[in-house]
Image: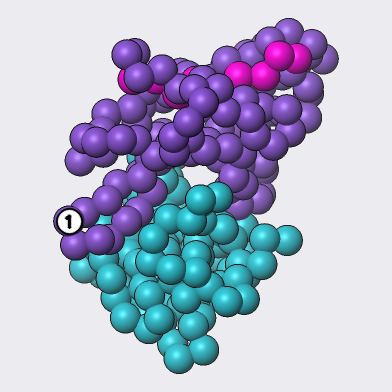
């Protein structure tokens, strides 16, 4: 157990729907990163939060949004889902908004299947 | 922008043989390089890193990586492969902006299959 908790582990939903993925960072970590892993594009950085504030955006679609709450857990909201959104979504955390010497700590991911 | 490339989608090796998973990088400045492993239904796990110092870096599970500045490579190696090493391996590089923001940029991954 890495200490980063992601729920749910699996999610199957229909096109056009909206889902929320949840991430609880490792205890003491203030920074949360979201990555999308798809078969054809590898791991793509989506967005980063640090202590409740958005720090950076990557290749995140306008249909996607995220936030980090006062208790430091983060949620990734995906709306108007399309088949191409099917992927594994990872959350990672670190203490600071920089890369630790030993890299991020990753959760086990949420597998989203859009049918 | 910083990037890494993993030229092989899959590497096959027999148990007991040495293995190499290739990674090349493109960075401005000094590279911070990482290798991660992903087992089925699991998150990415840190294997090893290169920041500075010795070009041969030792990591978890008997893996090591060789940093080669002239060839801009950071290949992952293990002297004797185990069936349990079968997994997806990612090379990554630190991307740092002038704003101070940092993130990891990952390669596309290489699937390692070790046959008994």
Chain bearing tag 1 is: B
Q: Any idea which chain is the cyan one in this picture? A: A
Residue B106 vs A104, above or below: the answer is above
Comparing A76 with B25, the one in front is B25
Identify the secondary structure beneath mark 1. Answer: loop
Report the residue marked by disc 1: B98
Q: Nearer the viewer, residue B65 or A113?
A: B65
Q: Residue B58 at what x, y percent from top left? A: 63, 29
**Farthest front residue in view:** B53
Is the stretch drawn in magenta largely helix, strand or loop?
A: strand
Q: Position of residue B38 (x, y in %)?
A: 61, 41
Indicate whether residue B78 is drawn in magenta.
yes
Which image quadrant is residue A80 in?
A: bottom left
- For chain B, what colour was chosen? purple
Residue at the image position 66 percent from the left and 67 percent from the top: A3
Magenta span of residues: B72-80
- Residue at the extreme bottom: A70
The furthest residue to the left: B98
Question: Which residue is rendered at x = 67% and y = 43% of the image?
Answer: B40
- Can residue B71 be seen at all in this image of the molecule? yes
């Amino acid at each position: 157990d890495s200490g980063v908790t992601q729920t749910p582990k699996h999610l199957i939903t229909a096109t056009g729907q909206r889902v929320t993925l949840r991430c609880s960072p490792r205890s003491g970590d203030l920074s949360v990163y979201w990555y999308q892993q798809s078969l054809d594009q590898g791991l793509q950085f989506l967005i980063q939060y640090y202590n409740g504030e958005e720090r950076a955006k990557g290749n995140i679609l306008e249909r996607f949004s995220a936030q980090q709450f006062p208790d430091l857990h983060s949620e990734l909201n995906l709306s108007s889902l399309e088949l191409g959104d099917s992927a594994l979504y990872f959350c990672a955390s670190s203490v600071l908004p920089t890369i630790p010497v030993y890299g991020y700590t990753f959760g086990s991911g949420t597998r989203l299947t859009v049918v | 922008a910083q990037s890494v490339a993993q030229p092989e989608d899959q590497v096959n090796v027999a148990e007991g043989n040495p293995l190499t998973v290739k990674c090349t990088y493109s960075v401005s400045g000094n590279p911070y390089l990482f290798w991660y492993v992903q087992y089925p239904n699991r998150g990415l796990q840190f294997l090893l890193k290169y920041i500075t110092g010795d070009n041969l870096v030792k990591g978890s599970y008997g893996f090591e990586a060789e940093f080669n500045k002239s060839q801009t490579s950071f290949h992952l190696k293990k002297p004797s492969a185990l069936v349990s090493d079968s997994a997806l391996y990612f090379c990554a590089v630190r991307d740092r902006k002038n704003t101070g923001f940092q993130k990891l940029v990952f390669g596309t991954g290489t699937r390692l299959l070790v046959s008994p």
